[in-house]
Image (spheres, rainbow, N blue to C red):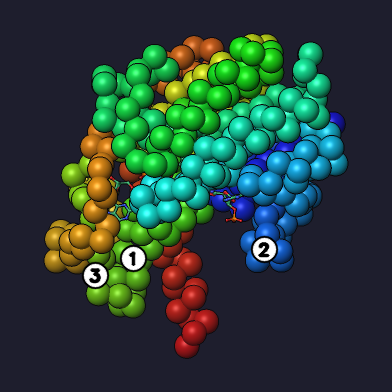
Amino acid sequence: MKRALITGITGQDGRYLSEFLTGKGYQVFGMIRGQNNPKAKLVTDENPRLELVEGDLRDLGSLIAALEQVQPDEVYNLAAISFVQLSFRQPELTAEITGLGVLRMLEAIRVVGGMENNPIRFYQASSSEMFGKVREVPQTEATPFHPRSPYGVAKVFGHDLTVNYREAYGIHASSGILFNHESPRRGHEFVTRKITSSLARIKLGLQESISLGNLESRRDWGYAGDYVEAMWLMLQQDEPDDYVISTGETHSIREFLDVAFHLAGYDSWEPYVTHDTRFDRPSEVDLLIGSAAKAKEKLGWEPRVNFEGLVKMMYEADLEAEAREASREQ
Ligand code: NDP
Ligand code: GDR
């Protein structure tokens, strides 16, 4: 039975990946931080075969201890400060966790696995935010980076380091350059989930409007359940490498609103959306659209859920959850 360690187990991707790997027959360990983390119960209720180990990306000793305890075949490093807007307010913490955290995990693997023929395979959660002010359209593995936030800068550091540890120490380290991926498990701070959960509440008469920032930026949005399979596929290859994972379609926030409000039976979203400058960013990523041609060719990976299917899945899940919550409160 293969053994996998996932950091960021309580996040959107950690939850899907743990279920995916358990389904493949893995023994899965999730790294959990803090004392009495309330999300521990959520993830073990969801996946009763998941085991938890303590650790924090800010603490090298805790990473070494986790690796010694788990003895993993594969490590998926998903933990991060992942909210771009927060990274402008807490840039040092973002660099510490999203950037230096990768260094600590790679060092832990180097130390625990030994320098030569290190058997631990490593996945780094890199991001399309690294492309930032995009140098070409669509973005591929060869597109130069121009990050536009402290988060993007920290991810470039983690990505470059992953490549360096592969080249310097022969570690089977791969970097997945994943474009935005969403789901009913997406955090409420991200724009897609903020829209679908607010819309569900508007539909149920529990809320009047949504305050948003920039509606013009364009993202290549896929479904998280599809994307975790790509992470696993990367670690099954003989050679480690970097792969863009995306749908190849781009949509603005306005288009997301169009589809969501139409699904909910509204002619227009405009009466329900207000602009709040607090959600604008000091520098923005205007356009993202990826080419996953390499992943298709080498990994045989393709997304299954399209944009409309994704919006529908998220809105319907939120409508059900909000209705359940409202009836419980009555
Ligand atoms: P989430 O924000 O949902 O999850 C982040 C996870 O990181 C949480 O489990 C959190 O744990 C954990 N974490 C934060 N700080 C630490 C720390 N100091 N030590 C250990 N764990 C910590 O992210 P997603 O699941 O959406 O994304 C997973 C990864 O993929 C992230 O690295 C993200 O940057 C990257 N990514 C995501 C994309 C997306 O569209 N979702 C696209 C491209 C890249 P806790 O619950 O304790 O706070
Ligand atoms: P992003 O996702 O920054 O692409 O990072 P987010 O959903 O936060 O923003 C997408 C776009 O929507 C605009 N926007 C708003 N965003 C939020 N969060 N809240 C608002 O009210 C709002 N109004 C407009 C933003 O300005 C932006 O242009 C996500 C994260 O998961 C990263 O960790 C990951 O690396 C990238 O996707 C790929």
- In the image, what residue occupies the spot 26% across and 66% down? 210
Give how far across and how far down residue 127 sits, in percent.
44, 33
Vertical position of residue 153 compared to residue 145: above or below: below
Residue 46 sits in which quadrant?
bottom right
Do the CB atoms of the residues marked 3 and 2 lie less than 8 Å apart? no
Occupied quadrant, residue 65: top right
Local SS, label 1: helix
- Secondary element at image label 3: loop
Dot 1 and dot 3 residues touching (CB under 8 Å): no
Q: Which numbered disc, 3 or 2, marks the residue that appears first in the sequence?
A: 2
Q: Is mark 2 within 8 Å of ligand 1?
A: yes
For residue 37, which numbered disc appears in the image? 2
* Amino acid type, label 3: Ser
**Percent coordinates x, y for residue 191 in the rendering:** 34, 53
Q: Residue at x 54, y 12 (%)?
A: 298
Q: Nearer the viewer, mark 3 or mark 2?
A: 2
> Does residue 200 appear anywhere in the picture?
yes
Q: CA distance from mark 3 to mark 2?
A: 33 Å
**Position above or below: 217 against 213:** above
Three-letter amino acid code at the position of disc 2: Asn
The circle on residue 198 is 1
Q: Which residue is mark 3?
A: 209
Percent coordinates x, y for residue 287 in the rendering: 25, 33
